[in-house]
Image (tube, helix red, strand yellow):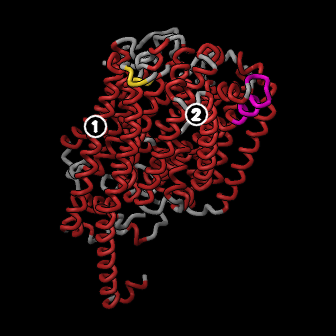
Amino acid sequence: MDTPPADEAAPPEAQRADESEEFRSLRASFRGFAFPVTAGFILWYLLYVLLSSYAPAFMATKVFGHVNVALVLGLLQFASTFAIAAWYARFADRRLDPAATAIRESRQAADRAGRQDSAVRLPQEAAE
Amino acid sequence: MTTPLAASGLATAASDHRGLTMTLFGVFVLATLGITVWAGRQTKGAADFYAGGRGFTGFQNGLAISGDYMSAASFLGIAGAIALFGYDGFLYSVGFLVAWLVALLLVAEPLRNSGRYTMADVLAFRMRQRPVRTAAGISTIVVSIFYLLAQMVGAGSLVALLLGVSGDSAKRWTVVVVGALMVVYVVIGGMKGTTWVQIVKAVLLIAGAALMTVLVLAKYHFNISSLLGAAADASGRASAFLEPGLKYGTSGTTKLDFLSLGLALVLGTAGLPHILVRFYTVPTAKAARKSVLWAIGIIGVFYLMTLALGFGAAALVGPGTIKASNAAGNTAAPLLAERLGGGAGSTGGAVLLAVVSAVAFATILAVVAGLTLASSASFAHDLYANVIRRGRTGEKEEVRSAKLAAVAIGAIAILLSIFADKLNTAALVALAFAVAASANLPTLLFSLFWKRFNTVGAVSSVYAGLISSVTLVVFSTVVSGAKTSLFPHSDFHWFPLENPGLVSIPIGFLAGWIGTLLSKERADPAKYAELEVRSLTGLGAH
């Protein structure tokens, strides 16, 4: 396939980045957020599904006017979805993006430096 | 959508609005074809054709994702289900929305960073290319064809109904025209053209739904409780209409079926091929995240509006009239539009009915185009270029094979839709979600987050999920043993549920786990390290 060679070549520093303290902490913050929150909203959704099926009397309880518990819980699923999305957006902006950018840029800089080194030694390779 | 169409309510009004509806259809088709030709001129290489040059912004892609996701089944189907079954119709919208959190937290960003054009790219990153691309390509095409069938069979009945024409030949011509248009969008416009069609459609759909929602709420002085009360009164079921159970609460089996459907909805979205390819149309993972955030906002607001439309249709049109027009309730939204405009025979009613019909038509066209693009991309990029030709194709040849695949998939979809026009569309959509959740999601999550996962695990997970979900459906009442079945006169069903998700999703996950542990193959830790770094930081991403 006609692919840009730089993209296809495995960045050799990937594994070193994986072992770095910065990367391990980035991975821990991502997983520490994404995994428990996913488990949480799936359980919360299943609770809603199970209540709808197996607790009709509770769901039929009137809250005000014609609005019952079932409708309120359904709307709360909407509210919690919006809230979790906003929470993750904030978390990613503050905790994930700066760390990811720093790792990417330092690795790219190291890569460029590496290439310049080899260009000095082997000018014909840099020209390829 | 496939029940015999006794278009009593709409037929009388048909002559008033048919000319206007046809004009609006025509305007939409011409405008989108214009966009397609413009986009086609800018489409040169594979990255343009498959990923729209990765040049869309998060907001644009968020709109396009919403356009891809809000099918006619959600707009007409959910509004209709709420109008007929009250609260139980609303249960669909909740699952359809919550599902986006899976895409946001676990799939969108890593997929954007580690793949190029298709879902299989992520698997192929550290597994053996040919087996995983074959498996992922097949499941992508199967899911897309189920979804495509649902949309096109629905389109046939629906457009015939909206235009007030009856008979099988009208339905067939609709299917042929819809199929031909979707192929033209994809072949000429590629991803760029298709994305713009989705954006236009999403804006039209949101605007149409918002207008109707405001009109409905205005009738009840913006008091939700009195709208609910009026809907409950008109339904003849009193307060039971506002409580769960009218559709899914009748027996132990229907309750389990609902649980199964709920699981398939919430886990299927992040495995739908036409949704996954959308994440490649933006330049960075951060833009992919922004597009999901926009999509959650747009889709969430849209489903809240369908709640008002469904209860509004129940209150203002009445379930009796809706059922007489279409037993599945698919015409609830158009009938409501006519009522809001001033009723049958009035100019306002005709105009609003024509506008809503045109929006529904735009919705169908955009969704089928998205599905055709996703499946032909997977055929060309995964099966043809990397499995059959083992990576020896040039970019031009690969794009040409994608265009040929789009024509072939379009032809297959048209033929199947014509012969399968008695299939229950809602069951087909639910099945597509179940297959996506059983065959695509487990392997995608394992390959992104489980270091030991290997080729055998990936291949077992895809095939086990795919085969178990399809087999269970074949032996359910969707295919035989009930009046609504594909073969109503024979009975070979033994699986009690209509939706296979409850069984097939765990099978997909278990097969991936067991296949990995049983295989002697050791996952390459260096490759996984590279995938992890790329998926979290974007280092080396396309």
Residue B365 appears in the picture as rendered: no
Pointer 1 chain: B
Q: Amino acid at mark 1?
A: Phe
Q: Amino acid at mark 2?
A: Ala
Alpha-carbon distance for marks 1 and 2?
Answer: 31 Å
Residue B241: x %, y % from top left: 47, 17
Q: Is B75 above or below relative to B390?
A: above
For image coordinates 70% across by 27% down, the residue present is B338
| Residue that appears at 19% across and 68% down | A20
Q: Magenta residues, as a range?
A: B343-355
Pointer 2 residue: B72
Determine the secondary structure under disc 1: helix
Residue found 32% across the figure and 27% down from its top = B502
Dot 2 falls on a residue whose secondary structure is helix
Q: Which mark is residue A64?
A: none
Label 1, on which residue?
B509
Are there few (<14), some (14-19), or many (20+) residues within 10 Å of tag 1? many
Tag 2 subunit = B
